[in-house]
Image (cartoon, helix red, strand yellow):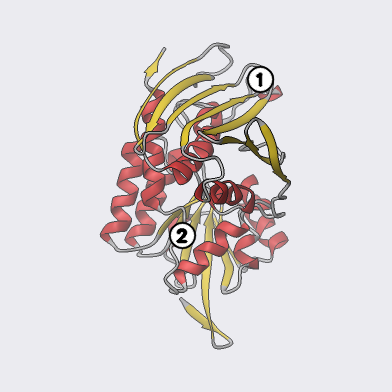
Amino acid sequence: MSTKNNKKLIRWGIIGCGDVTEVKSGPAFNKTEGFELKAVMRRDEAKVKDYAKRHGVDKYYTDADALIHDEEVDAVYIATPPDSHLNYALKVAEANKPCCIEKPMAPSYAESLQITEAFKKHNTPLFVAYYRRSLPRFVQVKKWLEAGEIGTVRHINWHLSQPASPTDLSKNYNWRTDSRVAPGGYFDDLASHGLDLFTYYLGDIENAKGISLNQQGLYDAKDAVCASWLHKGGVTGMGVWNFGIESMDRVEIFGNQGKIIFSVFEERAVQLFKEGKMTEELSIDHPKHVQFPHVENIQKQLFGDGYLHPSPGETAVHTSWVMDSIHGVMI
């Protein structure tokens, strides 16, 4: 941490300035008070130079080690595909710099555990970009649950499906469907968001089982998953994720006095039902830079006011365990 105009300043470097960093996350590191985006890294020199110019970033690198060890970089955001997270994260931990990693933390629970243990060893803060824990729309659902609006929660159900995309049908390369990077295909990239959010709402999951397979043969990763799980508090859960049928994104949380309906990805209102009737419907827009509240919460913790971020490494590694458990029987 440095100072600028007698104010605390944390200078960030980004490893992997691809699509997710253009609008969703990257600008938030410049717009958050006390943060500055100081350096970016990408292996393609022309692309990283262009990114730095467009976003007003002082430094750019094609070598991740150079960025990690830059004395003007205080913290690092890793925004590369999941199969590279372990390599970069261990280097950031060894450099003793706070780190935020894109989700999922790694392709497996074992690698996620290695990452969290490395940061624990150095007593260095680790965050994972499960940013829905910080978004007002999803925080509203948590408020309803904590206020007992639907009574005692009994069950949660999520159906997420999408038809095959033009990229899928063309069979052009996509790391999200490369089994070496994401064994579960789109499930790894998308389902992790919701499952992480459910543990935020309902507590850790103690048992999870699933079946995953490839129904379409368009790529080598899985394209269909179904699962059931049990939260430690006794709430049951079921999920279906299929990436070869019509689109649907619907979560229902059932209590003994009502239910809550919302979507993890679709732009729709959150709805509260009691005695079979909708009693409240709230449309809460996401900010332009959707990770902005997540990054602001990182600032709150790093600036030492006692605040604890809702998405630290410890909760994300649990999500990785749930994901591995649900992969279950791979056909």
Per the model, the C-alpha gap separating discs 2 and 1 is 36 Å
Q: Label for residue 164? A: 1
The residue indicated by pointer 2 is 309
**Residue at x 65% of width, y 67% of height:** 31
Quadrant including the C terminus: top left
Amino acid type for the residue under numbered disc 2: His
Amino acid type for the residue under numbered disc 1: Ala
Q: Label for residue 18? A: none
Drawn side of residue 323 relative to residue 216, left or right: left
**Residue at x 53% of width, y 35% of height:** 189
**Residue at x 55% of width, y 28% of height:** 158
Residue 77, horizontal then vertical, whole percent? 50, 56
Give residue 168's quadrant in the image.
top right
Residue nearest the observer in this picture, 191 or 200? 200
Q: Callout 2: 10 Å neighbours few (<14), some, many (20+)?
A: many
Q: Callout 1: 10 Å neighbours few (<14), some, many (20+)?
A: some
Sequence-first disc among 2 and 1? 1
Quadrant including the N terminus: bottom left
Is residue 322 shown to the viewer in this render? yes
Give residue 165's quadrant in the image.
top right
Residue 88, horizontal then vertical, whole percent? 41, 50
Q: Secondary structure at mark 2?
A: loop
Residue nearest the observer in this picture, 263 or 75? 263
Tally of marks: 2
Q: Nearer the viewer, mark 2 or mark 1?
A: 2
